[in-house]
Amino acid sequence: MFDGFERVEKVKQRLAEEETARAELEIQRLDTILDVWSSYYAVLTSLRQVQFAQAALSSSQENFDASQTFFEDGLATISELVSAQNELAAARSERARANADYLTAIASFTLAMGGPVTTASNEGSSSKYPPAAMVFWVGETGGGPANTRSVWDPNSEGTYGGVDDPVRRNGFEPVGFRPLQNPFYVALPYCDMQGGRLKAEAARLVPWFIAQFRGPGSSVCKGHWLEIRHGAKTCYAQWEDVGPFRTDSAAYVFGNDRPAPNINHGAGIDVSPAVRIIWDTGLWTWLTGDLLSNPKYSPGCGHWITIYKTSRETLRR
């Protein structure tokens, strides 16, 4: 029965509505991305203001201390001392304002990322309990999950260049090939990504989040440096996977909690075969700067000599 193209027009209308809805979703997506990046740069700006305010406060404090000494020695007048004191008070006020602006910017950034505002600390601890360690390796297969892929790299074995065999070794490298990436790597039980995007909580949990943020689709934890110490031995390694057993142990990884109980004697870190050669178990601590500019090389570890070039950085091993 001819309906005057009514059904055709309804289909066209529905298709137009769907296209409009898709366009509106795309606008919302772009607006969200803009909000994230705008909030991120606002955090960077406020952080610089804090640094400037702190430098000004230090200068004012030194000026006041000098003025007070000169006044006590009769080399300065009371008006000069009061002027220096007023400058110090103003510098303290400016630093407090800058700190408040920075915290506000952090809160806005967290909201832009989709998380709640929280007063949780973002500092992280400088060292950890000496956890039990498990050895794992790229390309590992067996009773547990295969390590042919990592949380952050769906083809970690290919990216690495092959299986990092823990038995057949040529020093710190596997026999048969030279790794394309740093053979000194670890896994820790926290993942900052979910569904291909950064978790909102990462903005407040990861101490170096602002410095390493490269967009909502890029991990801020992958590749981060750790310093591992055991007795007189020191090793540097990069965070390249998540485990053992857990992916949500932020209170341990970034705080002061002990690792969650597990069947491997409470293991809190997975280490690569190269790291295992150096130490049995020990403390680990975050490196906040580039390894290449870090002066703390152990004189007893002569293997920190060869240069490895990867897609992300250069490692002095």
Image: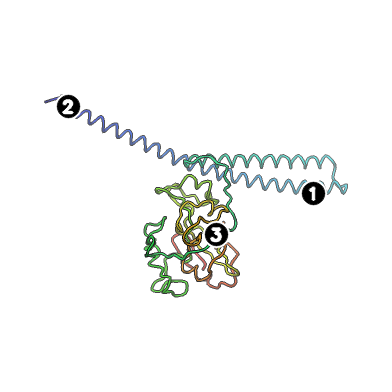
- Residue in the image at 50% along x and 71% along y: 277
Q: Is residue 147 above or below residue 201?
A: below
What is the x, y in percent for residue 315?
50, 65
Q: Give the Cα distance between marks 3 and 2.
A: 68 Å
| Apparent side of residue 31 relative to residue 296 in the rendered image (left or right) | left
Of circles 1 and 2, the one toward us is 2
Mark-to-mark CA distance, 1 and 3: 37 Å
Label 1 sits on a secondary structure element that is helix
Where disc 3 sits, the SS reads loop
Q: Which residue is mark 3?
A: 290
- Compare marks 1 and 2 and give the one earlier in the sequence: 2
Which residue is denoted by mark 1 in the rendering?
66
Q: How far is mark 1 from mark 2, CA to CA? A: 91 Å
- Going from N to C along the chain, the mark reached first, 1 or 3, is 1
Q: Residues within 10 Å of mark 3 (few under 14, many from 20)?
A: few
The foreground one among 287 and 272 is 272
Question: In the rendered view, would you say 244 is above or below 57?
Answer: below
- Say which mark, if any, is on residue 5: 2
Horizontal and vertical percent position of residue 157: 38, 63
**Image point 52% across, 70% down: which residue?**
278
Q: Amino acid at mark 2?
A: Phe
Q: How many marks?
A: 3
Q: Residue furthest right?
A: 74
Q: x, y (%) of residue 169?
A: 43, 74
Where 224 falls versus 67 (above or below)?
below
Q: Quadrant of residue 42?
A: top right
Q: Amino acid at mark 1?
A: Ala
Up-down: is 93 above or below 59?
Answer: above
User: Callout 3, which amino acid?
Assistant: Asp
Q: Position of residue 284 (x, y in %)?
A: 56, 61
Pointer 1 local density, CA inside 10 Å: few below 14, some 14–19, many at least 20: some
- The disc placed on residue 313 is none
